[in-house]
Amino acid sequence: MDASDILIVGGGLVGQALAARLSRDGHDVTLVEKNPDKIRELSDTLDVQFVEGNGATSPVLRAAGIERAGLVVAATESDEVNVVVGFLAAIVFDVPRVVVRVRDPGHEEGFSKACADRPGDRFCVNPDTAAVNRIASLLDVPGAVDVMQFLDGRVVVAGFRIGYESDFAGLQVSDMKLLFASNPTLAVAIERGGTWIVPGGFEKIMAGDLVYFAIARHELMDVLLLVGVEPEKRGRIMVTGATSIGLALAKRLEASDKRVVLLEEDPVAAGRAAEELDHVLVIRGRGSDQSLLEDEEIEHVSTFVAVSDDHESNLVAGLLARRLGAGRSIVAIDNPAMASMVGDIGIDAIISERLLAIGQMLQLIRGGGVRSGAALLGDEVEIIEVEAERGSRIISAPLMELGLPRGVLVAALHRGDELVMPKGSDQLAPGDRLLIVVMADLVSKLTDYLEA
């Protein structure tokens, strides 16, 4: 993709973050935003071109250079605007790659069908779906503050706050090979005192660290024991908020025979939820109502999930639920900056739809065989699943001779049916699937190794 051909419509938090990241990666980015005050504000912090106007109109898109664009991203807060931008980019201007942010499955279906026979890559990113998937992954891993799955679910990447009682406290990263000799289970990122590192073998894991491990799925229980995760409290899962996320999560949990209680204050939304759910108890009320939580025996709830549209209320409800005895609390918070505070404010896990949307968009935007990817809490470290391409530098020599920058770690290799932790002497082959951990400011350098 030409470095000068990226056009982003929408200067909200998602558009800002994408523009900043892509600009940092070396691309020349044009950002379309209709609010002149926001443009003035952003012009002091973003090294991009700005075009003021309604991005859902052809004249504004032409002024922004859409006719020479290799990529258009529609990232406003409006599904309707994003779909119109997507239609114009994909059908009118024949832009090779288009990424559209949508929440309504109907809009997602309509855009996909309309573009099905058109040349080029057309993608939809649904932050609600991403949030439900992330919450479901968290529910599968007790004690984790963040969870992702890669390599067809064979590898789980999970973050844990390391306590003094943990067997990992004081352990050198390289010593993990003694514990998991034949499996790709490794500490791949550490946050300590606000600073993130991709650790080398001599780095020590310290009590208080937030450590992300790449874990072979069948080794997950052993890692939980070494982390010192307490046995999960058995009981119901309580969800507050009959939002699109709350309903989709309740349906998924219901389908897996989990006992679920759904709280919703609005009588219309509560009634609609009761009609859509067969085996979920729907109760009218607020998740931040202490009397209601006590009446519903919150102390017997294994996990409390707050996903209402009022994110301040979600935070209050999550803190209250934990104080009243819930085993674990997961809350949706709109401010991505809050995600890095997980564990410091009495919340077990924080879901930021914006960060999830940004991560998904980045994985779709980047080439070099990227299959999936995600940003860790704090957005300073990324994990990328890639397929090694014929002609790329990543396969040109053994790993130790490639000169990969410090801060880039090849954490796992999937070749055929084999899943291993690669050694420096290993040379990759076309078609190998890799799990790579990289500091965000090194992604552009890593891309040089991945592109054919």
Image (spheres, rainbow, N blue to C red):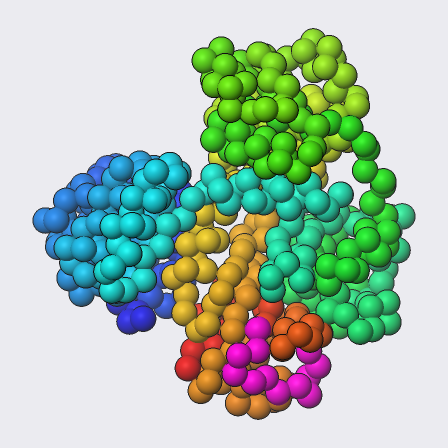
Give the prevailing secondary structure in the magenta stretch.
loop
Going by the picture, which residue comes out furthest to the left?
A: 59
**Viewer-proximal residue among 289 and 418:** 418
The answer to whether 89 is drawn above or below residue 438 in the figure is: above
Residue 326 appearing in the image? no
Q: Is residue 38 above or below residue 124?
A: above
Magenta-colored stretch includes residue 199: no
Q: How many marks?
A: 0
Q: Which portion, as a residue range, is magenta?
A: 422-433
Task: Name the quadrant containing residue 329.
Answer: top right
Residue in the picture at 24% in, 64% down? 119
Q: Position of residue 13 (x, y in %)?
A: 40, 42
109 displayed left or right of 225: left
Q: Quadrant of residue 205?
A: bottom right
Is residue 134 toward the left or the right of residue 170 in the image?
left
Q: Quadrant of the C terminus?
A: bottom left
Task: Tell me if 412 is positioned left or right of 309 in this view.
Answer: right
Picture layout, residue 404 above or below residue 160: below
Front residue of this view, candidates 281 and 288: 281
Residue at image x 32%, y 57%? 122
Name the spot of residue 422 as percent of width and height, x first: 68, 78
Give the answer, above or below, for where 344 lies relative to 85. above
Coordinates of residue 407 in the picture (x, y in percent):
60, 69
In the image, what residue occupies the spot 45% across and 47% down?
357
Q: Residue furthest front?
A: 278
What residue is drawn where x is 52% and y is 83%?
A: 430
In the foreground, 317 or 339? 317
For the N terminus, the image quarter is bottom left
x and y, in percent, of residue 85 in the image:
23, 47
